[in-house]
Each structure stands twice: as structure tokens, then as C-alpha cells.
Image (cartoon, rainbow, N blue to C red):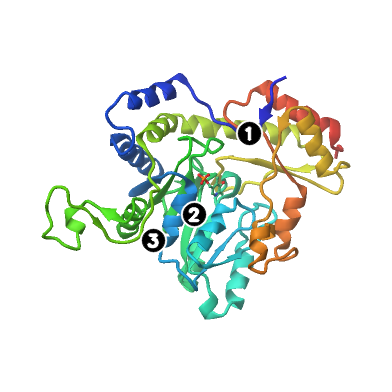
Amino acid sequence: MDFIPYGKQEILQEDIDSVVSVLKSPFITQGPKVLEFEEKVAKYVHAKYAISTNSATSALHIACLALGLKKGDFLWTSPISFVASSNCGVYCDAKVDFIDINSKTYNIDIDYLESKLKKTKKHKLPKVIVAVHFAGQSCDMEALYKLSLRYGFKIIEDASHALGGRYRGDKIGGCRYSDISIFSFHPVKPITTGEGGIATTNNQALAKKMQILRSHGITKNIEEFDNPKKDSPWYYEQQILGFNYRLNDISASLGISQLERLDSYTYKRNKIAEKYNKKLEHLEVITPFVTSYNYSAYHLYPILLTKNSEISRKKLVKKFLDSKIGVQIHYIPIHLQPFYARFGFKKGDFKEAEKYYKHTISLPIFPSLSDDEQDRVIKILEQCVAKK
Ligand SMILES: *Cc1c(COP(=O)(O)O)cnc(C)c1O
């Protein structure tokens, strides 16, 4: 029997053709494909600007810098995320803190956030909140936006899981209630460029700042020169300290080809989730809860064991792995990572996050997961978990 991972890319002949055509063209790095990909993603999510990067992690870094995050500032995010969601704050020498999750959606809990904001002294309020759309379901952005107006923080949506999803009818990434949205194109994410990421925004100044930060802090645009008289054809200016965070044309051409199938991918993921929901109904597990105003991109399908499941999480994970099913745990709470202990975080700090972590298992979900493969996953649960 073949190994079933929890998530994987689908590469078709059309993807290969798209990449090969770039390899045969004069430009393999900063050619026309990067721009085309950026335009297509911007159009897809209904944002004015899209700035591609070599990963979502780099996109988060330049998003924080563009918003002016610096030493002494605070960045708050969810403890149930990949470490990149908070590391971006550390890169900028800001102080990181966390917002506990909601026990149903596993996204940041808005009531918890509101009371934490109320309790926090003015000079310690967050400058940036990174809202993680966990598993592909958007956070309650309207409520978060209202709080941002009252408390003056900026919002980055870490939508690494969520390309293709919708919030109150809007495509995630359109930034109606945020400053910047970030997507990842790592192979397990909704679509892939190999490695890659993108930031979307409707704010021209933020877009320009991120563009220059991703490419060494250099501009070749004569209208932006500090020395406007220097109009020699070779002239360029480094104006700030930037990075080489650029995506390349080879990766972008894969992204362009993948983007064509994004809607069908999201549909398939939703169908797989529906089948899990139905087939696991009679078992002692908690299946994901999606609010009525969300259309989830279903990057992940995390289930929770309960005190009635009659099997430990560890045993169940082992059983899956022995059956060649690559379940995963998303995520170890960030505040419990050894690196974060140096900032004073400890066990017990974020109770819902820790409770969730103790019981969760992510089942395989990806567009090419076959019916038979999904049945293999369900069968293990039927064998191991108590019935209701
Ligand atoms: C994958 C992921 C990232 C990082 O993405 P890369 O493209 O691998 O840098 C950041 N945040 C979340 C929530 C992710 O899942």
C-alpha cells in the first residue's frame, strides 16, 4: 500500500510545460512571469497590489518592516500556528506575545483579545497583530478590524493556509479589514511554486515599501531616486537595507499554472472534508467547526480526541503511521518552543491552545486524495476510536 501524506502538491503535465517554457526562455529569474503571477494573484483575491517573495516567511518579514515594526514594539499572534507567524516579530527586534485561541474555530479568540487589550498598558499595546487563518478558515476579521480602530494596531493576515477561501463572501487576501495579507506556496499549501510566498495589499505606500525591501533596498525607478539628476542608464540607488527575497520566473510559471486549478482544488478539499464530517459523525472525535460566514480553504482537517475516545493520541498516531498514513500535529504551541522560553513563556500561559494541542491530529487532505485512500484513513478511526 502506498504511503498517504497529510498533504501534498499535484503536478500535472501543464505545470511541467509551463516551467520548461521558462527554462527555454531568456529570463529565468526576473522576467515577465513574476509580474504576470503577481497580477493574477492580485486579481484573484481582489487586491490592488501583490508582491511575490521566495517564501511566506520572507513576506511576513517585509510586511512587518513595511508597517514600521521595530525594537520596543509589540507583535501579537496565535500560539497555534507555524513559528514563522511570530518569528517575523523577532526578526524586527519587536516583542512577541500571543492571543489564546477560540476552542471551536482554533483561530484567535476575539473576546480573549479584547480583554487582553483592555488590561494592557498603553505603551505595551501591540503595533501589529498577525491574524492566522488556521486550517484555511478566516479569523473574524470584522471584529478584529473594529478593535484595531479602537486600539490602533495594524493587521497582517497570515493566510498561508487560506488561498481560495472566502470570508463573508470576499476572497481571503482582498484586505478589506487588514493592511496586508500573506500567502505561502510551499508544496503542502493550497497551490505551490516550490518555495514561494506573496503579500497582497490595497495600500500603495506599503506595496512600494515591500517591493524595495524584497530586493536589497534598491530602486531602478528614476521617479523614486534620491538623486534625481542621476539619470544615466546604469544608475540605481540603494536607499534602505533590504534583502534578496525575490521569487523567480521558474517558480512563478509553476504558480501561474497552478492558480488555474485553485478553485477546483478548494472545491475538492471541501468535498473531502464533507465526507470526513459525515463518516466520523458516529465516533467520539470532534471534527472541524466552520462558521456560517466562512468558506474554508481546508488546508488542514484537524480532529480532536475526547475523554471518551478510548485511545490515546500517541497510540492513534502510531497506528496511523504503522498503516502508512502520514498524519501530523498542527501545531506545537509556539510559546512552548525552547526558543520562546527565553522570552519568559511557559506551560499554562495559553490554556485553550495547550488543550487543543494535546488532543489534535490532522488527517490527510489534499486535492488528489482518492476515495479509497480516504476510506483507509476512516477505517483506522473506526477500528480505534470509541463509538458515540
Ligand atoms: C507554511 C506557513 C508559513 C511559512 O510559509 P513558507 O512559505 O514556508 O515560509 C507561515 N505561516 C503559516 C501559518 C504557515 O502554515
| Amino acid at circle 1 | Ile
Disc 1 is placed on an element classified as loop
User: Does the residue at mark 1 contact the one at mark 3 (Cβ under 8 Å)?
Assistant: no
Disc 2 is placed on an element classified as strand
Which one is earlier in the sequence, the residue at label 1 or at label 2? 2
Relative to residue 374, is residue 39 depicted above or below? below
Residue 365's mark?
Answer: 1
Residue 174: x %, y % from top left:
41, 49
Q: Which residue is mark 3?
A: 66
Number of other residues with Cα within 10 Å of mark 1, as a class: few under 14, some 14 to 19, many 20 or more:
many
- Residue displayed at 75% across by 65% down: 348
Residue 189's mark?
Answer: none
Q: Which residue is mark 2?
A: 157
Q: Is residue 387 left or right of residue 164?
A: right
Q: Is residue 263 left or right of residue 24?
A: right
Relative to residue 336, is residue 311 depicted above or below? above
- Point out the frontmost of discs 1 and 3: 3
- Residue displayed at 63% across by 31% down: 272
Residue 341: x %, y % from top left:
67, 64
Residue 15 occupies quadrant: top left
Disc 3 is placed on an element classified as helix
Q: CA distance from mark 1 to mark 2?
A: 23 Å
